[in-house]
């Protein structure tokens, strides 16, 4: 009896898909649909565009699966493809706000570090605040920091470093700044400033 496809690794599913298994492709889509859609939606803030971009990511994989090198990094490849689709969306929409600039105060990269293995970013902030308050505060972050928040929900610091092609120290510093800015925004909200 064949092992349940949901128990297969990403690379095994890619191999099965290359061999003609449509069910393997569907399994990959189902495995990543929530994470990927949430990331894209968080970045573009448009349901229609997010749905289209999500489909484009998997269409790209469908067409170019033969070019994917199975090294256990399918998730990183998928999020990198999504990020490129998001950047193209903004470029094509004349809304491009570079995600690779300095922070909102003009600071260059900080090289602070955070320990890996900590709780997901939004879990860390969701003490007394509601998820809706956190979501609204996240929308007020600069694009680079907002992207970091959404990626950190689904990926390790190392995976984010690979997807963004940035040094690990830079990713850690960006994440730290995003958390501090979110904490500041949430504190302002509790002092009476509405998000």
Image (cartoon, helix red, strand yellow):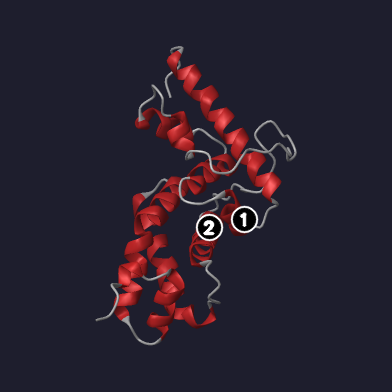
User: For mark 2, does the 10 Å Cα neighbourhood hold few (<14), some (14 to 19), or many (20 or more) residues?
Assistant: many
Quadrant of the image containing the C terminus = top left
Contact between marks 2 and 1 (CB within 8 A): the answer is yes
Give how far across and how far down residue 108 sits, in percent.
75, 39
> Which of 129 and 4 lies nearest the eye of the viewer?
4
- In the rendered structure, find residue 134 and report the number of the disc placed on it: none
Give how far across and how far down residue 78 sits, in percent.
48, 64
Q: Secondary structure at mark 2?
A: helix
Residue drawn where x is 38% and y is 65% of the image: 55
Q: Secondary structure at mark 1?
A: helix
Residue 178's image quarter?
top right
Looking at this view, name the residue that lies furthest to the left. 1
Residue drawn where x is 42% and y is 31% of the image: 134
Give how far across and how far down residue 58 sits, in percent.
41, 69
Looking at this view, name the residue that lies furthest to the bottom. 19
C-alpha separation, residue under disc 2 versus residue under disc 1: 9 Å
Q: Which residue does the numbered mark 2 point to in the structure image? A: 83
Quadrant of the image containing the N terminus = bottom left
Q: Which residue does the numbered mark 1 point to in the structure image? A: 164
Instruction: Locate residue 164 relative to residue 118 in the image: left or right.
Output: right
């Amino acid at each position: 009896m064949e092992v349940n496809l949901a128990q297969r690794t990403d690379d095994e599913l890619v191999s099965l898909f290359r061999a003609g298994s449509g069910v393997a492709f569907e399994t990959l889509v189902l495995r990543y649909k929530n994470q990927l859609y949430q990331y894209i939606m968080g970045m573009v803030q448009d349901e229609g565009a997010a749905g289209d971009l999500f489909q484009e990511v998997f269409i790209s994989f469908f067409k170019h699966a033969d070019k994917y090198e199975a090294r256990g990094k399918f998730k990183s490849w998928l999020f990198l493809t999504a990020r490129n689709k998001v950047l193209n969306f903004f470029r094509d929409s004349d809304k491009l706000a570079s995600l690779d600039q300095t922070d909102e105060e003009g600071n260059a990269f900080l090289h602070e570090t955070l320990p890996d293995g900590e709780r997901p970013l939004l879990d860390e902030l969701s003490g007394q605040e509601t998820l809706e308050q956190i979501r609204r505060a996240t929308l007020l972050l600069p694009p680079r920091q907002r992207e970091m928040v959404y990626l950190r929900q689904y990926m390790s610091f190392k995976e984010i470093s690979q997807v963004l092609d940035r040094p690990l120290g830079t990713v850690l510093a960006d994440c730290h700044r995003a958390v501090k800015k979110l904490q500041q925004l949430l504190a302002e909200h509790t002092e009476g400033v509405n998000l």
